[in-house]
Image (spheres, helix red, strand yellow):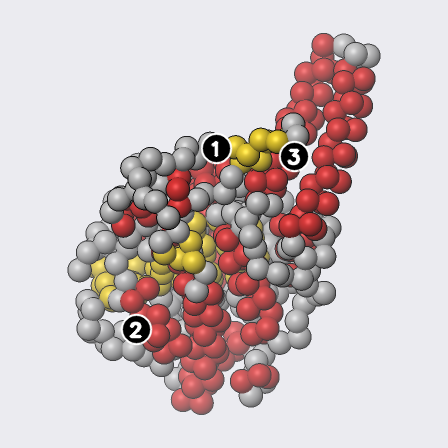
Amino acid sequence: MFVTGKHLDRRTFLRGAGVALSLPLLDSMVPAFLTTPALANAQVKRFGVVYFPNGLYMPNWEPRGDGPTWEMTPILAPLDALREHFVVVSGLTHQPAVSLPGEGSGDHVRASAAFLTGVRPKRTEGPDIHAGPSLDQLVARELGKDTTLESLELCLESNDLAGACEAGYSCAYANTLAWRTSTTPLPMENDPRAVFERMFGDTDNTTREAQLAQIRQDQSILDRLRTDVARLSRTLGSGDNRKLDQYLDAIRDVERRIQKAEARSTIELPHFDRPVGIPSTFDEHARLMFDLQALAFQSDTTRVTTMMLARETSQRPYPELGISDGHHGLSHHGGDAEKIAKVSKINAFHVKQFAYFLDKLKSTPEGDGCLLDRSIILYGCGLSDSNSHLHTDLPIIVAGGAGASIKGGRHIRYADGTPLTNLQLTLLDKLGLQLEKFGDSTGRVGELSEV
């Protein structure tokens, strides 16, 4: 191999037989002799969110000691082998989820609805729901410009709850973390098969042949639509043609997605068969969904994912752990040692699945590093102490490298009362989005990039 100072333009195309396929990001598209940080900045970035419900028993979570010499705790123990790849953050507050005087309960619904929006949700059981655009969707608007899908929203429980879920709050607040706008919550998908088909269409696997067959089918449908629209347009007046333009926008978006799929088909992907359905155990289900997210990042199908391990107030038992009690009931342990042991075991089990995801990204090479190096993954909950419904000193992890802009292996303790949104605003900076304010933020946090 000859190394020169020249590099290929990112917009390089392969041309032949009248077809133009944009190339995936290749090493030769980055100028030779760049330093590692510069090389990382030349690569794409990804953002993921993993949410766990119901809070936890904080003494079994919070690290002992600050900085790089902190001691591992029982709940965080599954992450021990990856400790250089994440930062544990303490001291953050989730004020939009705190009960107002006379408001009563609703802490669980507000915890999840405000976690990525930084906005207190409107208390309503009707259709007039209101929160705010979520962090993941702000990122998706930017990072999704060059991908087939702007984002993926995933969960491990069905999202079919309707009506009021808690203290006069609509179930719409409990079913998702992702809000496209302040009035538009995005549904989360729990069926791996449906997620695969959204990513790759009606194909049986990720082979290049299967992808190209789907692209040809989609292109054929699009060509027919374009012909039909052109024919219809000639028969309509100016008013109807303006309305037809909205439909044409949708067609153009489909065309853009097909072009992105063509580019993706040049990337060599691991063989991945279309899932047959929802696995029977929690860990099998979680790991399959994490596999799909890693595949989405690797194939550049999307650069933004959001996942709920379970919704707030989930009463799911964990028979694989020998726990038949519902999770939410155990979280209100009342100081009972047996219940504390069980709920901490569930929390550690959730962390174990998260560790699997991080390890998957770490073991997937990209450029001179790996997918984890190019990603920011936020793990946490909108509640801390589960027994008291506290929204202070939240359990938060920031994992990944985001182009060497995050230094792992540390426990950072911010001043009590620091808004969660201050951290989130800082993460937006690291992902290339410059906002003056996000939710109830009062500024930015430091120390993510240095000791």
Report how far apart the C-alphas of labels 2 and 1 lie in the structure.
49 Å
Q: Which residue is mark 1?
A: 12
Where does the image place residue 150, in percent across and percent down from the top left? 54, 42
Question: Can residue 425 be seen from the camera position used here?
Answer: no
Q: Nearer the viewer, mark 2 or mark 1?
A: 1
- SS for tag 1? loop
Where does the image place residue 341, in percent across and percent down from the top left? 43, 86
Q: Nearer the viewer, mark 1 or mark 3?
A: 1
Q: Amino acid at mark 1?
A: Thr
Q: Residue at x 57, y 80 (%)?
A: 318
Q: Residue at x 35, y 66 (%)?
A: 395
Where does the image place residue 107, in percent across and percent down from the top left? 46, 62
Q: Which mark is residue 62?
A: 2
Q: Residue at x 76, y 10 (%)?
A: 237
- Locate the C terminus and report the quarter of the image it occupies: bottom left
- SS for tag 3? helix
Q: Which residue is mark 3?
A: 254
Mark positioned earlier in the residue sequence (1 or 3): 1
Along the horizontal axis of the image, is 418 left or right of 428? Answer: left
Where does the image place residue 439, in percent across and percent down from the top left? 37, 44
